[in-house]
Image (spheres, rainbow, N blue to C red):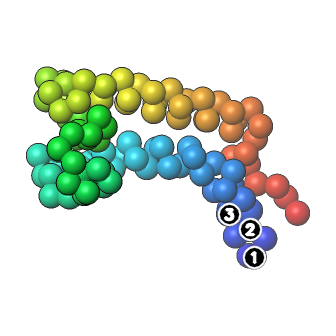
Amino acid sequence: MKAKIINILKIIRANLELLTWVTILVVLFFSNPANHSYSLCLLDNLGFEHCPGCGLGRSCMHALNGSIVDSFNSHPLGIFAIFIIIFRIMTLTKNAIKYKTFKTNRL
């Protein structure tokens, strides 16, 4: 039992970036872009009026929910960011399959 847990933790550790990007896309897909009650932006929290990255997450939420115009109005690079994330997920998945980091090592 302990060996299985160790193997699972090794798989998670080897694929942590992949799991992180997939989790981010899932959270963005199921989030409501109209509900803007908090911000993780440091500049926004410090009181600055403009941040070049503000609205990017909301833009991705709109795009994943099919509102392309709202996505572009929130941030022009939101759709591009989604394509970059999907490309990164595909690259990490391909590398994980190539180097067999999805499989457990038998002891």
Comparing 78 with 52, the one in front is 52
Q: Quadrant of residue 90?
A: top right
Residue 3 image offset from top left, x and y in percent: 78, 71
**Residue on which the image places disc 3:** 9
Residue 38 shows up from this direction = yes
Q: Amino acid at mark 1?
A: Lys
Q: How much space separates mark 1 and mark 2, taking CA atoms?
A: 6 Å
Residue 60 image offset from top left, x and y in percent: 28, 35
Circles 2 and 3: CB atoms closer than 8 Å: yes
Q: How much space separates mark 1 and mark 3, taking CA atoms?
A: 11 Å
Q: Residues within 10 Å of mark 1 (few under 14, many from 20)?
A: few
Question: At 18% from the left edge and 33% from the top edge, which residue is drawn?
Answer: 74
Question: At 56% from the left edge and 44% from the top edge, which residue is drawn?
Answer: 18
**Residue on which the image places disc 2:** 6
Left or right, residue 94 beside residue 47: right
Residue 21 image offset from top left, x and y in percent: 48, 43
Circles 1 and 2: CB atoms closer than 8 Å: yes
Q: Secondary structure at mark 2?
A: helix
